[in-house]
Amino acid sequence: MSSGLQSISGTRLGFLLKQKMFSWSGNSFAIKDHTGQEHFHVKGNAMSVRDKMHVTDAAGVKVAVLQKKILALRITFYIYSYKPNFDGQESTETDKDGEALYRYAFVEDQVLSFVGRQVVKRFLTSNEQDEAVGAFEISAQFAMKFTCQIKTYLTPEEKKKGGAQEVIATAGQTTFFQWEGATLIGVEMAPGCDVLLVLLGMVAAEKIKEEKSQGQA
């Protein structure tokens, strides 16, 4: 990739995500790299009617918003940026301060997946979800603890033709026994990844897994 939500990984990178059960309602967590340096800060909005998280960089500058889509047939989360992603893109939402937001990508659960799979697509030419372009997919793996692979996106037709998917990142719980409310997820990604999109994709995937385990889907 040549551009991303925040930055593109230039080398192989590792991050830790600490997901809290009540993050939507005001709690927050930091996203740190493998050295312990904080890169992003994620905070829930206690006053939001819909599930919403606000993301800032280490300096406190607003960079993105993650929000659950209501009335969706599949559990879906939208990722918003603070600047247009294509010429003429209109703002469809505002943040807690009334600042304009622009649709950047969405994370959609795939209901026919037994172990868990989410598809991430970018809004590159239109705000319409059915015109978004595939970026990558997050696929859970069979294991003693939660692990998943993040692979380049292929259409169903490309998969039928035997197209190969490249693994661009891996993620998983860092210990065997963790409470769902304090899951610590390690994410390792290859060079060329849209760093914040991959990380927020994993946050959304964790929320989807949590909701499905609680029977909210």
Image: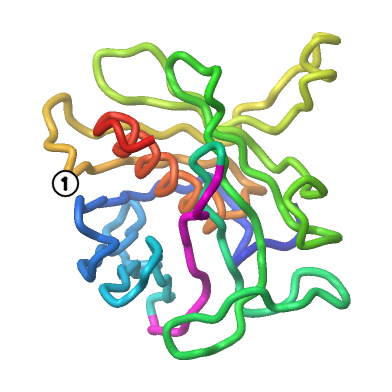
Residue sitting at x 13%, y 34%:
178
Specify the segment rendered in magenta: 59-72
Q: Amino acid at mark 1?
A: Ala
* Horizontal arrangement in the rendering, residue 2 relative to residue 177 (left or right): right
Residue on which disc 1 sits: 182
Asked if the stretch drawn in magenta spans residue 188, the answer is no
Asked if the stretch drawn in magenta spans residue 71, the answer is yes
Residue 198 location, x and y as percent? Answer: 53, 48
Q: Quadrant of residue 126?
A: bottom right
* Horizontal arrangement in the rendering, residue 62 relative to residue 155 (left or right): left
- Foreground of the two, 157 or 192: 157
- Foreground of the two, 8 or 133: 133
* Horizontal arrangement in the rendering, residue 79 relative to residue 26 (left or right): right
Q: Quadrant of residue 175?
A: top left
* Horizontal arrangement in the rendering, residue 206 relative to residue 105 (left or right): left
Residue 17 location, x and y as percent? Answer: 31, 50
Residue sitting at x 18%, y 38%:
180
